[in-house]
Amino acid sequence: MFKLNFKSGIRGTYNVSDNPSFVAEPWSIYPGKHRSNGKLVSVFIFDKTKFESQVNRLCSTSSAAKNPKTIISECYELIKFEVNQLSKLKHPQILTIFEVLEETKTKFLFASEPVVDNLQTISHNNLDDLSIQKGLLQIAKGLHFLHSYCSIIHLNLQPESVFVNSQGDWKLGGFRFLQNLNEISPSERENFYIMNSSFVPFANLNLNFTAPELIIDSHTNLSFANDIWSFGNLIYYLYNDHDLLINCFDLNSISDYKQEFRKFEMKFYNHKPSELKYMLKNIPEKLYPIFPQLLARYPNDRLTLEHFIECEFFNGSIIKAMWFIDEFSTKSIDEKLMFMEGLLVVDPSTNTNLISQFPAPFKSSKLLPLLVEVLVNEFNVLNENSLLDNKTNKLVCYSLEIILDISQSLSQLTFQDKVFDSLFKDDTKKNANKILTKMLTSSVRVRLTLVENLAKIQEKTNDKQFIDLIKKMLDLVLTSSPKELEAEKETQIKLQDSFLQFLPKVVERIEFPYIKNTLFPLLCHVFKTTTILSTKLITIETFEILVEKKIIDKIIITEQLFPVLKNLKSRDKRVVGTVLNFFLRLSKSSHVSLELESMVDSVLPQCLSLAFGCNDCTQSEFRKFMSVTNDIQKELVERKLSSLPTAAASVSSTFNGNANTGRPTTFESLLKTQTIGDTPKELPGPQSKTIMQPRRSGQHSPINSFKPLHGATQQQQSPASSFQPLHTSNTVQSHSPISSFKPLQASPGSSFKSREASPASSYKPMQHSPASSFKPIQPSRKQQTSSPTLTFGATTSTNNPSNTRLLNTLQSTFDRRKNPDDEFDDFQSANTGGGLPMKQMNDRNNHVNKSLPTPPVSTPSVNYPPGFNSNMILAPKVSSSGAAHGTQTKKINSDLSDFL
C-alpha cells in the first residue's frame, strides 16, 4: 500500500509504502514508485519526532548526559553531512541519490536507487560464495575510488553501511564519519581522536570494525589502512555467518575493545597462514595468503586495495565475467560481442556454459535486466522497416539467446514481468514503439534465434499469449522478402525447417478456422514454391503429423492438399518415398476417411506416376515404392469388397423381383419376419408405367379401343393379389406366389365370368397383336329385359347420398357432346405414375373406367333394379372381411351373375 496524501516534496512525487523494507540506523528504508513514470526508488526516512522523544527520555534518566538539544543538534548535523557526501560522490559502487535531503518539521528524507537489504539484514541463503566474492570486489573497487581519487577515508565500513540494490550489487553508504585527508593536516592525522562517548548508537563508531591504531595506540594514525582493517573484519563476518573476530559486549566501551583485541592478538599474530585455519574457519583457502596482511597489526604492514583486487582470488573466469557485466555499458561493441559469444560456449567436460555458473540472483537481477535494456534501446532507435547492421544484428541475437537461457530458471510470473511484457508484446498505445514487430522484421537471424527458443517461451506463457506470438511471426518465418533472401538464404532455409519441426508441438492449441484458412494454405504454398529438398521433406512430414493428430479433415485434404500434390514436379527418391508413405497413412486414416472414388482418382494414379517417374532410385528402392503402392491398392480393394454383398442372388430370385431387396428367401427367414398380433398393413399397388393408348378408328363403337404401350417395364407383385397391366413385349411377367389375374381378351358375344384362383395358381400373360383392342362390356338384351330382385349391394338414389353425388358428377360428363378428340385428350392426361393402395386398385378393377365418357345406350324403356339405370352400372360393395382375406371364397349373388 502506498501513501497518497502528500502533494509536494518527495512524498508528493513518489508513492511511498507504509511499511519499511528494512532499517539501517538511523534510517528506515521504504520502497517507492514515481507517480508519473513508474520509476522505482528507495526512500530513506528519519523520524525526528520519535528520535527527539527518545533523547529527551534518556537525558532525563542520566545526570551526566548533555543537554538534549545539543545531542539532537549534533546528530542532525551527522545526518546532513552523510547525505551531503553521498550526493557529491558518484561511482557505481557508491549508493546513488535520486532526490537530495528534504527536511520537514517531523522528517528527514531522501530518495536513492532501489535497495532491498544491507549486509546486516540480508539472509544468509542469499549469500553464496560467488555473490560474496563479487560483492567484495565491488566494495574493494568503491574503497579504491575513495582512497585513490578522492583521498577519503570511509572510517565506518561495517555491515550496516553496505547496501544491496535490486540487481544484487553492493553499494557503499554510511558516510557519517567520512574523513577527507585533503582537508586534514598531517599533524591532525597523527593526533586524530575518536569521540565515542555519545549514548546515541549511530553517533558512535562500531568498535568491532575499527582499526586498533585508532583506539589502542597512544598516537593515532589516520590513514587508508584504517579501512583495510575494517574490510578484513567484514570478510570474516560474511564467510562465517555473521560471526566477529572482535566482539565487544559494549560497542561504545574502549576498555571492552582493548580486552577483546588482546585475545585476538594472541591467537592470530605470529602464526603461519596455514596454521590459522582453525581461526579463519570458512574463509576460502585462496584468501589465506593475503588475509593476515589485511589484519596486520600496524597500518604500514597492511595490504593495499590494488594488490587485493589483483590477487589470485579474483582471477577466476566467473568472477571476471561478472565484473565485465558490471562494466558492460563502458565496453565497445566488439568487446561486447566477444564476451557474449564466450558466455554461450558450452564446456564439453561439464556440458554447460558459463551462464549456468552465475549465481541465480545475479542472473535474474543483474544480467537479465541489463540485456533486456540493450534490446529495448536498440529497437527504439530502429525504424520499423529497417534492417540491423551486421554487428548490431549479432548483439541482438546474442542478447536474445542469453535472455531466454536465463528465463528457464525464472517463475512464470517473473518472466511475464521482466521479459514478456518488455519484448514479446507490442505496446497498444498510439505512438508507442512496437518492439516485437521491429524484432521480427529486423533480420532473419533474429527470427531464427526466436524460433530456436520457442520451447522456452512456451513454458513461461499461457496458451493465448503463445499462440498470438506464433500467429504474429507465422508469415515472416515461412516467407521472406527478396532483399533478405539474397543476403541470408541459408539462414532463411534453417529458419523454415526449424519452425516446421516445432509446429506439430503447438498446432493442437491453434483454433481450426485459423488452420484451415491461414496456416494450412501457407504450408501448401511453402511446399509448392520451395526448391529446398529439406524444406519439402519436412513439409510433407508436417502434413502427415497433421493427419495423425486429426487436425485436418477430408475437405482440407481434398480441396487444398490434393491439387498441390498433383502438381508435384520433383521426382527425387526421398520426396517420392515420403509422399508415398503419406498416401499410405492417408488411405488407412479413419479420421480423414476419403471417398473411395477420390482415392482411386487422385491417389492411386499419383502413386504410380511418382514411382515410375523416379529415375535416381535403385531397384530395391523402386520395389519399395511399388510395395507401398500395392499396400494402398490393397487397402482400397478391401474397402470396395466390404461394400459388396458376400454372394450373388439366384436367377429365380432375380426374376421374381427379390434380388437385393432384403426380403426373405427361405422358409426359416420368412418365419423370422412374422410377428404375432400385428395388424396387416395395406400394401401399395404396382407403379406400372404401362399406358393404354387409345387408337382412333371409325370402325369400332363410340368407345375407343385401346392398345398397350410397348416396352413396359417389369413390375414386382406384392404377396397379396394385385392388378397386373397388359404387356405387349415378350418379357416374362413375374407374379405373386399367391394369385394373380390374367387379363381377358374381349370378343363379340363374350361375357365375364367370376373366377376363383387357387393360391398356387399362376397364369401366363396373353400375347396381343398391335391391332387387337378391348371393348367395354355391354349387357345383352336378354339380360336387360330381365328384372330380378337384387340384394347384393343394391341401393337407391334416396338411401345412398354417395350414389347421388356420383350420379351428379357423371351426369355432367354424359351430357357433353361426344367427340373422339376429347376422349383422346382425356386419356393422355390420366395419371400413369405412382402406385395405389391395394383396396383402391381392387375397387378400380370392379368399376367402369370413369376417366372416359360413356355414351348412353338407346334402348326401350326397361325396368332396372334399384340403384341402376340405362347409363351406368353400380359395382356391388365388397365386405371388409373379404378385402382383408383374399384367400376366402366370395359369396356371389346368382341374380347378379345372370344379369351380367
Image: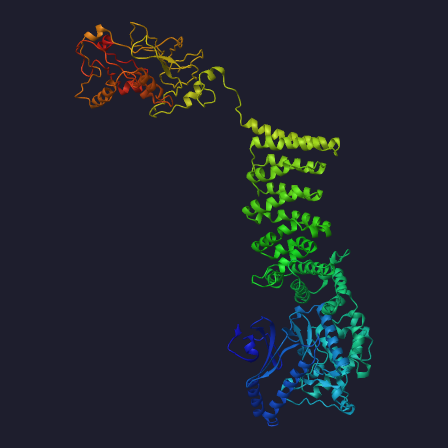
Question: Residue 558 location in percent, x, y?
Answer: 57, 37
Inspect this view and state whether residue 532 appears.
yes
What residue sits 78% from the left and 90% below the top? 186
Taking depth in this image into account, of 726 and 739 the one nearest to the observer is: 726
Hey, which quadrant is residue 606 in on the image?
A: top right
Q: Give the colour scheme of this rendering.
A: rainbow
Question: Residue 633 location in percent, x, y?
Answer: 62, 29
Hey, which quadrant is residue 863 in on the image?
A: top left
Question: Residue 519 location in percent, x, y?
Answer: 59, 46
Hey, which quadrant is residue 361 in on the image?
A: bottom right
Left or right of 462, for residue 614: right
Examine the rendered structure and indicate whether residue 514 appears above or below residue 679: below
Examine the rendered structure and indicate whether residue 664 appears above or below residue 158: above
Question: Residue 149 location in percent, x, y?
Answer: 76, 80
Taking depth in this image into account, of 223 and 290 the one nearest to the observer is: 223
What residue sits 23% from the left and 18% below the top? 815
Examine the rendered structure and indicate whether residue 434 appears above or below residue 843: below
Examine the rendered structure and indicate whether residue 581 appears above or below residue 430: above
